[in-house]
Image: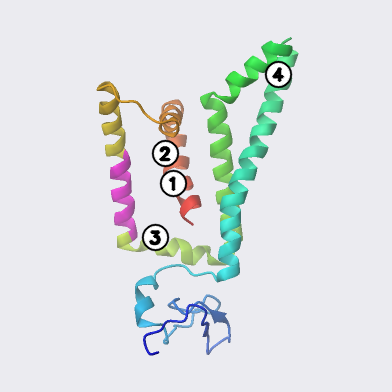
């Protein structure tokens, strides 16, 4: 069984005694180098390992938190807008029609999506408070930076190609249309949230 890799085995730090992921290059608590790392796991040595329970917690913050926050923000925004319409004298079908139009507007989409992503991003940073230094230090890796450059180039080229395709008569899906509308409505905010915060939240 020489070549069998047990994924449930834990490394024990000889310095502080902490049990941690055997594929981690160092102890997450004291930073002691993991000299017993499996050779097959060295390609993962640059990854930030947090442990099973913390990674599950991070997943729940991103997956469940994003959904719940979007719902919560949407309800508050609709109620606030409904109160404004009522003060303007709208009621019944007119009020319902105005709220339906508002809920499908670019402004509503920007408010709900961008605020939800921003709050989840802050929540993740607070959750990873002790590991933020290790997390951001990993971005100094040239491979990661080159990945950012390639990703940015793909976004630009995708936008150019999409514009050409639309002029040639092609249609876009709903998600693509929403993204394009938000970019046109607020380019800087779209680049910051859609281009930086959203991928960070979804991939972390």
Name the residue: 38% across, 76% down: 41
Q: Is residue 77 left or right of residue 86?
A: left
Residue 186 image position (x, y, % from top left): 46, 29
Residues shaded magenta: 144-155
What separation in Å lies between label 2 and label 1 (alpha carbons)?
7 Å
Name the residue that disc number 3 marks.
139
Q: Is residue 31 left or right of residue 170?
A: right
Label 2–label 1 contact, CB within 8 A: yes
Q: Earlier in the sequence, mark 2 or mark 4?
A: 4
Name the residue that disc number 4 marks.
84
Q: Earlier in the sequence, mark 1 or mark 3?
A: 3
Please tell me how crowded label 4 is: few (under 14), some (14-19), or many (20+) other residues with Cα within 10 Å: few
Please tell me how crowded label 3 is: few (under 14), some (14-19), or many (20+) other residues with Cα within 10 Å: few
What separation in Å lies between label 2 and label 4 (alpha carbons)?
31 Å
Name the residue that disc number 1 marks.
196
Residue 118 image position (x, y, % from top left): 55, 44
What separation in Å lies between label 1 and label 3 (alpha carbons)?
13 Å
Label 4–label 1 contact, CB within 8 A: no
Say what secondary structure mark 4 lies in.
helix
Q: Earlier in the sequence, mark 2 or mark 1?
A: 2
What separation in Å lies between label 3 and label 2 (alpha carbons)?
19 Å
| Residue 81 visible to an observer of this rendering | yes
Name the residue that disc number 2 marks.
191
Give the main secondary structure, helix, strand or loop, of the magenta stretch.
helix
Name the residue: 67% across, 17% down: 96
Residue 81 image position (x, y, % from top left): 67, 23
Q: State which quadrant residue 44 falls in.
A: bottom left
């Amino acid at each position: 069984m020489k070549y069998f890799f047990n994924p449930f085995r834990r490394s024990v730090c000889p310095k502080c005694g902490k049990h941690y992921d055997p594929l981690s290059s160092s102890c997450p608590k004291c930073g002691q180098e993991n000299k017993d790392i499996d050779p097959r796991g060295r390609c993962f040595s640059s990854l930030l390992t947090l442990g099973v329970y913390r990674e599950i917690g991070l997943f729940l913050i991103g997956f469940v938190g994003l959904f719940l926050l979007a719902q919560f923000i949407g309800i508050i925004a609709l109620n606030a807008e409904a109160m404004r319409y009522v003060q303007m004298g709208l009621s019944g079908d007119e009020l319902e029609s105005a709220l339906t139009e508002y809920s499908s507007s670019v402004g509503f989409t920007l408010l709900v999506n961008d605020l939800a992503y921003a709050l989840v991003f802050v929540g993740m940073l607070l959750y990873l408070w002790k590991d933020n230094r290790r997390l951001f230090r990993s971005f100094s890796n040239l491979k990661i930076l080159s990945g950012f450059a390639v990703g940015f180039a793909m976004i630009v080229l995708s936008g150019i190609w999409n514009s050409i395709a639309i002029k040639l008569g092609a249609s876009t899906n709903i998600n693509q249309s929403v993204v394009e509308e938000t970019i046109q409505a607020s380019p800087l905010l779209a680049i910051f949230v859609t281009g930086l915060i959203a991928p960070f939240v979804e991939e972390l």
